[in-house]
Amino acid sequence: MGEGRILFVDDEPQIRRVMRAALSRAGYLVVDAGNAGEALLRLRQETPHLILLDLNLPDAGGVETCRTIREISEVPIIVLSVRNSERDKVRALDAGADDYVTKPFSMDELLARIRAAMRRIPTSPNCGPRSVVCGDLAIDFESRRVMVRNAEIHLTPKEFDLLHYLVRHAGRPVRHRRLLQAVWGPDYGHEIEYLRVFINQLRRKIEPDAADPRYIITEPWVGYRFEKQEPPFANREPEERESLSDL
């Protein structure tokens, strides 16, 4: 059985009733909204743990709504749509969605996707160091904070989980399927477009030059590798570091 509060956004009252009943039977608390404006109001009032968002809303496009939600909240978003093209999926993911489910779908599939979207990669002594400094990038895994050149940057939960997994396996290529299953869940493995979108987002946020990445390296036809970088002045003699700090 699931737990947590879900905001379901769809303009069809009958679909909202059916989904509310099905999700409630699965153990979730459900609030719903019929348009984008109502969804944003419910988001502020109810603080849901996850949003199910239909792309076809009467007052705003689902992609635009997704982007607006992401500006004010890190809540996981699963987009529901009859559109099945890779272009539509990439647009939704690029706007901040964590997952994309094509209609029609089974409730078992949707519930599995909900569980995957709500999960987090645990941080424990067995999962490697609690913090890492690589070049001008600093990551605190316990607080889920990331600093770049001494300035804190904002990562979505999925972006952080993806970075966390890559850093834990630094220096080794991680295959696409392994990354998808580690971050999204065991039912994933073929959604390569998810990785392309999220890796591009991460590079824009943490790399000095996203077009020429130094941290997240593409392994053609395989996956991605996190490349460790030495902290600034790490290889210099103590006297030289001290003299530089006095300048």
Image (cartoon, rainbow, N blue to C red):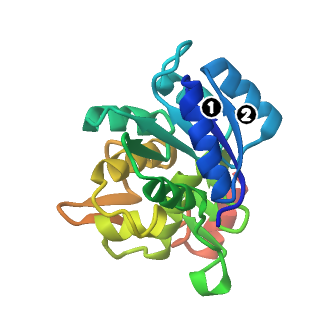
Query: Which sits in the foreground, 211 or 2?
Result: 2
| Mark closer to the observer (2, 1) | 2
Q: How many marks?
A: 2
| Residue displayed at 60% across by 70% down | 132
**Residue 209 seen in the figure:** no
Task: Please tell me how crowded label 1 is: few (under 14), some (14-19), or many (20+) other residues with Cα within 10 Å.
Answer: many
User: Residue 148, image x and y in percent?
Assistant: 59, 50
Residue that protrudes farthest toward the top in the picture: 59
Question: Quick one: label 2 or label 1, which is nearer the N terminus?
Answer: 2
Amino acid at dot 2: Leu
Image x and y of residue 88, in percent: 33, 32
Residue at 30%, 47% in the rendered image: 193
Compare residues 150 and 199 and report the one nearer the observer.
199
Q: Quadrant of residue 211?
A: top left
Image location of residue 108, percent across then percent down = 46, 59
Q: Indicate the secondary structure of the residue bearing disc 1.
A: helix
Q: Is residue 57 above or below residue 177?
A: above
Which residue reaches farthest bottom?
Answer: 126
Q: Residues within 10 Å of mark 2 (few under 14, many from 20)?
A: many
Callout 2–callout 1 Cβ contact below 8 Å: yes
What's the mark number on residue 69?
1
